[in-house]
Structure formats: structure tokens, C-alpha cells
Image: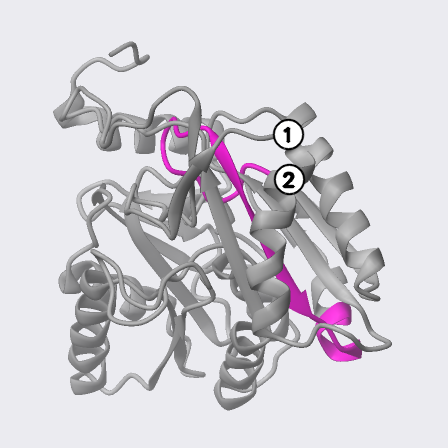
Amino acid sequence: MKKLINDPAAVIDEALRGMAIAHPELRIDHTNRIVYRGDAPAPGKVGLVSGGGSGHEPLHGGFVGPGMLDAACAGEIFTSPVPDQMLEATKNVDSGAGVLHIVKNYTGDVMNFEMGAELAAAEGITVESVIVNDDVAVQDSTFTAGRRGVGATVLVEKIAGAAAEQGRSLAEVTEVARRVNAASRSMGVALTSCTVPAVGHPTFDLPDDEIELGIGIHGEPGRQRVRMQPARAVAELMADPVLSDLDFSGDDGVILFVNSMGTTPMIELYVMYSEFAGILDKAGVRIARSLVGPYITSLDMAGCSVTLLKADDDLLRLWDHPVNTPALRRGC
């Protein structure tokens, strides 16, 4: 294992220290491992809290700031944060307008966020929750009951964050987040495994001439293993189950999000984007907006995921709303 770390047991705390130095506009609670907007709580604004296991950076801490999240809780590598973290974050971003929890559909995340919300409610804070479950690869997996929450998490955080920034109510922000999740579908592929620092060896074995189709962001198995193929063929294997799961036709088009799983470089992502764009064109699906890059990763895994969001005028306006976070900055 070759990694630029000091001690596997200290990597999360050291990364958060580095983040605090690099981004003084944020406020980081190192004791509770929570990343906050520097101005949280913003008066009169619905607070947005998300979080999850570390190892998926820039998700979630990289999306804290104006236009997206108010706070993000960092768990251990691939392990949910604990309810006390969610409670602390919720209390510190609540301005009286209520708080929305954005939760990826993994058993630990769902359970701990639910407990955190109950604890917050007991202290008089109004909390709503949205479960993101956009992965079409498998219905149930090692970590979930039902579909996993993957790429659409980024889109929910961006679009719901914009709605909150505009001053919409908790009910309205929650409705937007649920609408984004319902209109999104994702599929991933792994070319290699990832290596958890504390483990020191790959999570699973994947021969050099094979790829795992439908992989999860924690290294969970997907639909099938197939021979390594050219980008065009891999894109078709990924796009077909997405397009067959939801009708993406319509005048407003889609947001196409092509994401690196960690080590796949931009040159390969743009090759894949071109292939996905061709597939959508043949299917009569118009691309309205795009996002390409490493936004929800799995440590050092090679591979990519594709997410489609069926858009409408309101969602596109919210997508275009200014955002200023460490990992996503536009219109500021």
C-alpha cells in the first residue's frame, strides 16, 4: 500500500486539519468531526445537514458553503457518523426555520440520522429527512435495504441547497430534494478495487482483464463482472439500465453527471462523457446541464459512475444558482 498518510488511525483528523487551513471560510469542529459554513446558522434560512463515512471526498465536507450544505458530519472510513454528531450539527445550523437531513441510503446512515433527528426533535427542532436511493445496479446490497444512494446525492445537495439559499420553507426545500431524488438514476463501474488505509490491501480482487459493473461506493459487489471493453461498450452497459428504469425524454432535458470513483483521470471521464452523450442523443434525450469530475469517490478506486436527472425549469434554475464551496464553485 502506497498512500500519502502518516498514521491510518489519524488520517481523518489530519485531513480535517488540512481542510481547516486550506479553507478558513469554513468552521470545523475537530472534536465532533463536523464541517460548518462559517456563517452558520444563517438567519431565517433552512439548515441543510448531510454526512457519511469518510473516503468519498469531496462528499460531503467539500460541499459545505453558500448554496449547498450548512454542515457535514464525517464518519470513519466507509462508516456512518454517529447520532451525536448529527444532533450537534443540527443544533448548530438551526435558525428557527428547521433543518433538512440529506441521507444516502445505507443502513448505518439511515439509522443514525434517524436517531439524530429524534434527538433534535426532542430539543424542539423541526427536522425533515430525504433518503437518496438512485442506484439502479442492485435492489439490495451488503450495506442497504433497497437501492443505494450514490451520485444523485451531489445533485440533491446542490439543488436543495439553492432552494434553501433562496429562502424557501422547510416543506418546500424538502419537496425539491425529494423531487431530485425521484427523477435521478445512477450506475457505476469499477476497474480496480479501493484500499482502506487501516486495512492495507484491496477490498476485493478484480483481475486485470475484468471490470465490476454496478459497483457500490464502498466496494460492494455489483450486477456482474465482465471482460474489460472499450469505453463505448462500457458506456452502453452503464447507460442501458439507467435509461430503461426511467423515461428521461422531455423538452427540459437532463443533467448529465459523469463522476470519477477516485483515480480515473479527467481525460477518461471526458471520453466517457462523449459516449454517454452519443447514447442519449440516439435515445432522444437532450442534455441541458453537465457535471464532470471526482465528486463522490471511493478512495483510490478506478472507475466512474453516470447519473441522469430528469430536469424541469425550476430544477434547472436552482442548478444554476450561485454556489461557493471548496469542491463546487459557480457564479460567485
User: In this figure, which residue is indicated by the disc labeled 2?
Assistant: 233
Nearest the camera: 323 or 188? 188
Stretch in magenta: 293-317
| Position in image of residue 168 (x %, y %) | 60, 83
Magenta stretch holds residue 297 = yes
| Total numbered circles | 2
Helix, strand, or loop for circle 2? helix
The amino acid type of the residue labelled 1 equals Pro
How many neighbours does mark 1 have within 10 angstroms: few (below 14), some (14-19), or many (20 or more)? few
Q: Which quadrant, please, contains the N terminus?
A: top left
Q: Residue at x 39, y 52 (%)?
A: 36
How many neighbours does mark 2 have within 10 angstroms: few (below 14), some (14-19), or many (20 or more)? few
Q: Do residues under tags 1 and 2 come within 8 Å of each other at their CB atoms? A: yes
| Position in image of residue 163 (x %, y %) | 62, 74
Nearest the camera: 238 or 135? 238
| Position in image of residue 226 (x %, y %) | 44, 38
Q: Residue at x 50, y 90 (%)?
A: 171
Q: Is residue 261 left or right of residue 165?
A: left
Q: In the displayed structure, would residue 216 be above or below residue 320? A: above
The amino acid type of the residue labelled 2 equals Ala
Helix, strand, or loop for circle 1? loop
Q: CA distance from mark 1 to mark 2?
A: 6 Å
User: In this figure, which residue is indicated by the disc labeled 1?
Assistant: 230
On the question of residue 250 being in view, the answer is: yes
